[in-house]
Amino acid sequence: MRYLLLLLSGLAMIPASAVQAESVATEHPEARPFDESADGTVAVDAALARAQLADKRVLLVMGANWCHDSRALAGWLAEPRFAAMLDAKYELVYVDVGHKDHNIDIAQRFGLDAIKGTPTVLVLSSSGALLNRKSAPKWRNAASRDEADIFAYFDEFTPES
């Protein structure tokens, strides 16, 4: 466990715009965009400011590089087809949640009590309203989801009541 913590602490920050999918022997790409030393609040505030200027939503992915499902979702989001669609509609920001014990205040800021699974995916309006309260914590199976379903969710996203 100590080796894993040392390994994770050495990971470098990868800006959301520069995330590239890794070639892995799975049915999905993977990426590692979660920086445990980054200030998540600053990143989220910057994404909200950009979203207001560009009239976009914010796609806030709360996960960790140790999490297979977080890496899988980030890998899909980095694929060219996804990246083009997301760039037109969203400001994308990745926030590291450690072992569901880091940056929890960010989830609480948008109305979630805790991080129950990783990744937790929040779709926010440019004013910071959480638009997907019911489905936000249900992405912990991202690695087993179908590519077309993931794409459709974000491409045709409509606010939930």
Image (tube, rainbow, N blue to C red):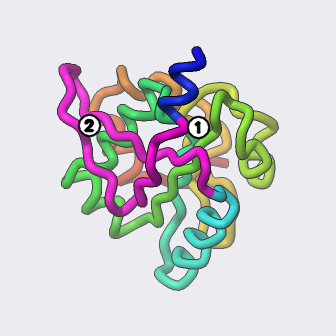
Give the residue displayed 46% in from the left and 22% down from the top: 141
22 is within the stretch colored magenta: yes
Query: Tags 2 and 1 in contact by the CB under 8 Å rule?
Result: no
Q: Quick check: 155 above or below 31?
A: below
Quadrant location of residue 16? bottom left
* Residue type of the residue flagged with mark 2: Ala
* Nearest to viewer (mark 2 / mark 1): 1
Residue located at (30% from left, 41% from top)? 76
Residue 40 is labelled as none
Q: Is residue 40 magenta?
A: no
Residue toward you, 15 or 121: 15
**Magenta stretch: dominant secondary structure:** loop
Front residue (pair 36, 146): 36
- Residue depicted at 49% across the width and 40% down the height: 10
Q: Which residue is labeled 2 in the image?
A: 148
Left or right: 79 as drawn, with respect to 72:
left
Position above or below: 116 against 151: above
| Residue 138 location (% of width, % of height) | 57, 29
Q: Position of residue 57 (x, y in %)?
A: 52, 65
For this view, does 118 lie left or right of residue 11? right
Image quadrant assignment for residue 68: top left
Q: CA distance from mark 2 to mark 1?
A: 19 Å
Mark 2 surroundings within 10 Å by alpha-carbon count, few (fewer than 14), some (14 through 19), many (20 or more): few
Q: Which residues are magenta?
A: 9-38
Mark 1 lies on residue: 120
Name the residue at the bottom extreme: 53
